[in-house]
Image (cartoon, rainbow, N blue to C red):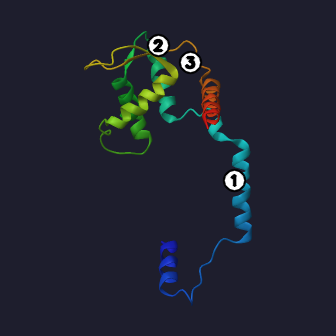
């Protein structure tokens, strides 16, 4: 709110209230953060996000129980699970399943599992956990590095 008022006052009375930019210290701090971020390169670390963690957990327990999960089962586990819904501080019913949820879960499931059937009609795609599901981060990092190399080569 303070920022909005400051913008309004500056727009109404530009001569009386000049715009204050960042101080030298703040600019230097931002520059340093940018340099640190460029050194760390978090985008190359093969990030495994929340959806992937939830999918991995559901597939892991399904493998222990010797069952296969469909994409719909995974979507309901990730987005509509009543326990995770309540732990995130949300009251009321779980959200309705939407089409974008299926796409995100399919991308995450491909990281940890093989498609073993389905895909047409009402059955949905069935997923089975890969035997090498523990070394995902190095595989994702290598895959992303190969993509960047291919992109540089094509340019």
Give the mark toward the camera: 2 or 3.
3
Which picture quadrant has residue 122? top left
Residue 34 has which mark?
1
Give the mark toward the camera: 1 or 3.
1
Which element is circle 2 on?
Answer: helix
Q: Residue at x 62, y 21 (%)?
A: 135
Residue that numbered label 2 is attached to: 63
24 w.r.t. 31: above or below = below
Residue farthest to the bottom, as pictured: 16
Q: CA distance from mark 2 to mark 3?
A: 12 Å
Horizontal arrangement in the rendering, residue 83 relative to residue 150 (left or right):
left
Using the rendered image of the protein, determine whether residue 93 is visible from the camera's viewpoint: yes
Residue 19 has which mark?
none
Q: Residues within 10 Å of mark 1 (few under 14, many from 20)?
A: few
Residue that numbered label 3 is attached to: 133
100 w.r.t. 28: above or below = above
91 w.r.t. 18: above or below = above
Horizontal arrangement in the rendering, residue 77 relative to residue 60 (left or right):
left
Which element is circle 3 on?
Answer: loop
Mark 1 or mark 3: whose residue is earlier in sequence: 1
Residue farthest to the top, as pictured: 66
Q: Return the x and y of residue 39 as percentages of the image width and height.
A: 74, 44
The residue closer to the viewer here, 111 or 1, is: 111
116 w.r.t. 149: above or below = above
Which element is circle 1 on?
Answer: helix
Mark 2 or mark 3: whose residue is earlier in sequence: 2
Horizontal arrangement in the rendering, residue 151 relative to residue 116 (left or right):
right
Horizontal arrangement in the rendering, residue 107 relative to residue 136 (left or right):
left
Q: Residue at x 63, y 28 (%)?
A: 146
Q: Quadrant of the C terminus?
A: top right
């Amino acid at each position: 709110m303070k920022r909005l008022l400051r913008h309004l006052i500056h727009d109404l009375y530009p001569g009386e209230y000049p715009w204050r930019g960042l101080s030298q210290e703040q600019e230097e701090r931002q520059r340093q953060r940018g340099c640190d971020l460029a050194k760390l390169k978090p985008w190359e670390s093969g990030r495994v996000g929340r959806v992937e963690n939830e999918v991995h957990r559901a597939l892991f327990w399904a493998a222990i129980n010797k069952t296969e999960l469909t994409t719909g089962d995974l979507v309901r586990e990730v987005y509509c699970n009543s326990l995770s819904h309540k732990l995130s501080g949300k009251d009321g019913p779980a959200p309705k399943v939407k089409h974008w949820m299926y796409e995100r879960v399919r991308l995450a499931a491909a990281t940890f599992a093989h498609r073993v059937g389905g895909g047409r009609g009402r059955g949905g795609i069935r997923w089975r956990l890969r035997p090498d599901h523990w070394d995902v981060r190095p595989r994702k990092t290598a895959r992303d590095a190969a993509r960047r190399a291919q992109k540089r080569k094509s340019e």
